[in-house]
Image (cartoon, rainbow, N blue to C red):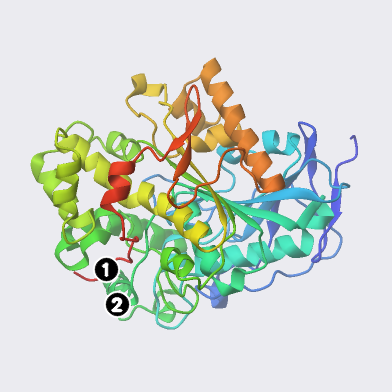
Amino acid sequence: MSEQPKVRTTEGVVQGRWRQGHAVFRGIPYAQSPVGALRFAAPAPPHRWEGTRQAVEFGPVVPLSLPITVPPQGTDWLTLNVGTPDPGAAGLPVLVWIPVGGYLSAASSDPMYDPAALAEAGVVVVTINCRVGAEGFAFLDDVPPNRGFLDQIAALEWVQRNIAAFGGDPGRVTVGGVSAGAGSVAALLTMKSARGLFRRAIAHSVPGLHSTPALARQVTAAFADRLGSAAPTAEALRDIDPWHLAAELTSFNAGLHTHRESWGRLTETGTALCPVVDGEVLPETPWPALTGARTSGTELLVGHTRDEFRYFSVMSGRYGTFTEEDAHAALELLAPQPDGARAYRAAFPQAGPEELVETVYSDALFRMPSQKLAEANAAAGGTSYLFELCWVAPALGGILGACHSLDVPLAFGTLDSPVGTQLIGEEPTPEAVALSRELQEAWVRFVTTGDAGWSAHRPGGHLTRVLDTESKTLPYPEQASRQIWEGHSPAPFDLS
């Protein structure tokens, strides 16, 4: 392995490097830089190049709308990375991971997504960057909506053209993601332009974050007005520095609660600019599309954590402070109408404000969208494998519970990554290592065969793999919430 690995793609030759027994190629462009005349446009095919392109460094991070400082690194945002057990192999299963969070960040360079363990198990891993925030999801009058989804499709098209040269099988592609990445996966299930680009799907903690065009238009107009723009158009915003635009969106998101009377449920998400059900790029939300047989089911591994909302309440400093007024507001805004608030209080009669807030937020934002996606996919003729992670994160004395994103370092086997150590601790316990191995083996088995290793989730049975120190396949644990949401699919946010 002294000679560094080279692969010829349809655009040119790339040279990566050997790392821990597998080949890694980083920063490969799958589309042109979306700047200048291409800013806010649909992704354009990548340029070809002569000679050998060095593919050893991650591409620049896309502008992030998060309360952290990330220095701009360049504008070649639309790149991807490939980790492969053997570029000279053939027919290996492929996992394409969409590392999108909150539709505000997308960093394929995050060590949490290191492909080493999965590559060692025989999987070709592709991680992608795509546009988020205003660049990817502002609803502008003169350009396509949902540009972040269009980027993902362009990356999947690149995979179909090129992954065989890296040892992968273009007919055995699984697309996966967590949180907004899982929402992206769910959207791809419904999009005509994504058909035939993947065979299976993995979705951890699917959010129900979608806006109607009416709401998206008003929100984007308010954001443009904040920037001093006369109109919510690409032409009006094109000259604003992308990182400045991202920082302005961070501030705009922080003040969403002031628009509660007009924008309703959207204001509880912290994400002003989310995917729009525009009727063309995204024709409808995945749940009615699947249950109405307007799109076909697939082999789907989907699940959530038990305490989805706990991470957000702890990190925001709100954990332990929620009042009856907070509980009332959360139930009125997020519980299914017309009598969801009453149903929650009846189903959880001993719950105080803290538990009610945590339950309804976990349900509305992640648990019910995930569970209902499993049901809808099965109704559309697909096979759904559902899980709930109940194992408690050891960090911070266990206060985080089985929180949002805990399952991702477990599945990738990246317990020593920054997120892994934040949630699991500097020294993973034997229980953490064993659970990581179990979830990782389920992933590998699923992307290879389409079978996660436990009973599929079927109407009436609702069988679920409960991941814990001793994992078991049981009836769905959150039955009380499931019954409250019976007959209610996650609906797009709309004007109040």
Q: Residue at x 50, y 27 (%)?
A: 471
Residues under labels 1 and 2: Cα distance? Answer: 19 Å
On the image, the x and y values in percent for residue 174 come to 65, 53
Q: Is residue 481 above or below residue 193?
A: above
Judge whether residue 428 can be spotted in this image: no
Q: Mark 1 points at which residue?
A: 226
Q: Mark 2 points at which residue?
A: 214
Q: Which mark is residue 380?
A: none
Query: Depth check: 361 or 319 in front?
Result: 361
Which element is circle 1 on?
helix
Please state which of the two labelled residues, at mark 1 or mark 2, is closer to the viewer: 2
Q: How many labels does the image show?
A: 2
On the image, the x and y values in percent for residue 56 come to 73, 45
- Residue 492 picture quarter: bottom left
On the image, the x and y values in percent for residue 62 come to 52, 56
Question: Which quarter of the image is occupied by the N terminus?
Answer: top right
